[in-house]
């Protein structure tokens, strides 16, 4: 009995080596690195039935109020998923402390990845609408234009890209729905074809699959939708759909970072091409 080997798995009810690294263990005991903390924020949003890459048309591209520099990549979705207003300006908590500015009672900040001395770290940001004792600039709600007009540049850019899958859908299929839903799906199809060309993929377009590649298409389409001021479907997904995206992020903490990086690269190519045409 003295030298008997103890079976800790049986005694504790879980396998230490496997389960101690599980998502829920880390969530309870706070064993997260930077990416895991941000990933946990997105998972929390899905648990609140908020899809981080969905937004209404009037939500602007978020930017730092001090520099007017736009937030990019996952920071874009972190900030947009935490507000539905049309104020684009954000400030870090460290700046508020220096200026003796306070958030309004009950207001919560949003984690954002920044670099200090080239080292990534998390800083909490507040939308200026969340602040008190702050000299608020005038912010007008943007004007709404028909999506068929705002999407012209996207159609122009993608018109010559080879189709890697014939996905048959037309705006009439969306009768009774917001027409923005049609454009968001179409943008996903555009991003899919560009992705297949860039990464030499031969795969069918399946927007209802819950994997990292589909996440690239949805995030890329969300960037394009923000550019065109078109809503991504701002509706409640079913619990099953939300859970599938949640499981993807729980199983792969890098999924949303990698998807956002690839999608942003394609979006930047689109913007630079459009700007080059406008300048010529």
Image (tube, rainbow, N blue to C red):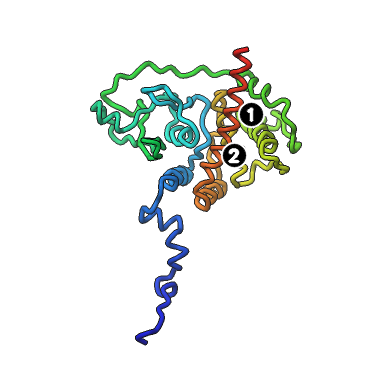
From this viewpoint, is residue 146 visible? no
Residue occupying the far left of the picture: 100
Q: Which mark is residue 183?
A: 1
Looking at this view, name the residue that lies furthest to the front: 117
The answer to which image quadrant residue 111 occupies is top left
Residue 136 visible, this orientation:
yes
Q: Which residue sits at x=43%, y=66%?
A: 16
In the depicted structure, whether residue 201 falls above or below residue 1: above
Q: Is residue 266 left or right of residue 246?
A: right
Outermost residue toward the bottom in this view: 1
The disc, 2 or 1, on the residue closer to the chain's N-terminal end is 1
264 left or right of 35 in image: right
Mark seen at residue 272: none
Residue in the foreground of this view, choosing between 75 and 229: 75
- Residue found 51% across the figure and 17% down from its top: 143
At x 48%, y 31%, the residue is 72
Say which quadrant the C terminus sits in: top right
Label 2 sits on a secondary structure element that is helix
Q: Please name which of the two marks, 2 or 1, marks the residue nearer to the observer.
A: 2
On screen, residue 4 above or below 81: below
Residue 113: x, y in percent? 41, 37
- SS class, disc 1: helix
43 relative position to 189: left or right: left
Mark 2 and mark 1 residues within 8 Å of each other at the beta carbon: no
Residue 100, percent from left and from top? 23, 27
In the rendered view, would you say 175 is above or below 213? above
Q: On the image, numbered disc 2 is attached to which residue?
A: 216
Front-most of residues 279 and 11: 279
Report the Cα–Cα distance between label 2 and label 1.
Answer: 16 Å
């Amino acid at each position: 009995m003295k030298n008997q080997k103890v079976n800790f798995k049986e005694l504790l009810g879980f396998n230490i080596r496997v389960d101690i690294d599980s998502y829920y263990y880390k969530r309870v005991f706070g064993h997260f690195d930077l990416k895991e903390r941000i990933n946990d924020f997105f998972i929390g949003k899905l648990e609140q039935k908020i899809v981080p890459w969905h937004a209404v048309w009037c939500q602007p591209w978020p930017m730092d109020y001090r520099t007017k520099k736009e937030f990019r990549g996952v920071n874009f979705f972190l900030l947009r998923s935490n507000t539905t207003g049309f104020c684009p300006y954000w400030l870090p908590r460290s700046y508020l402390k220096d200026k003796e500015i306070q958030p309004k009672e009950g207001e919560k900040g949003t984690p954002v990845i920044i670099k200090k001395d080239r080292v990534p770290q998390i800083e909490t940001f507040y939308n200026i609408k969340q602040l008190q004792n702050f000299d608020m600039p005038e912010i007008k709600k943007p004007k709404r234009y028909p999506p068929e007009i705002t999407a012209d540049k996207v159609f122009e850019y993608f018109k010559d890209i080879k189709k890697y899958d014939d996905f048959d859908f037309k705006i009439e299929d969306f009768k009774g729905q917001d027409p923005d839903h049609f454009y968001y799906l179409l943008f996903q199809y555009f991003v899919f074809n560009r992705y297949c060309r860039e990464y030499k993929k031969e795969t069918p377009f399946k927007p209802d699959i819950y994997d990292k590649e589909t996440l690239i298409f949805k995030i890329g389409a969300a960037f394009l939708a923000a550019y065109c001021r078109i809503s991504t479907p701002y509706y409640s997904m079913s619990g099953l759909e939300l859970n599938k995206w949640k499981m993807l992020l729980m199983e792969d903490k890098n999924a949303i970072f990698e998807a956002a990086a690839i999608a942003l690269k394609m979006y930047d190519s689109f913007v630079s091409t459009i700007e080059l045409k406008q300048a010529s």
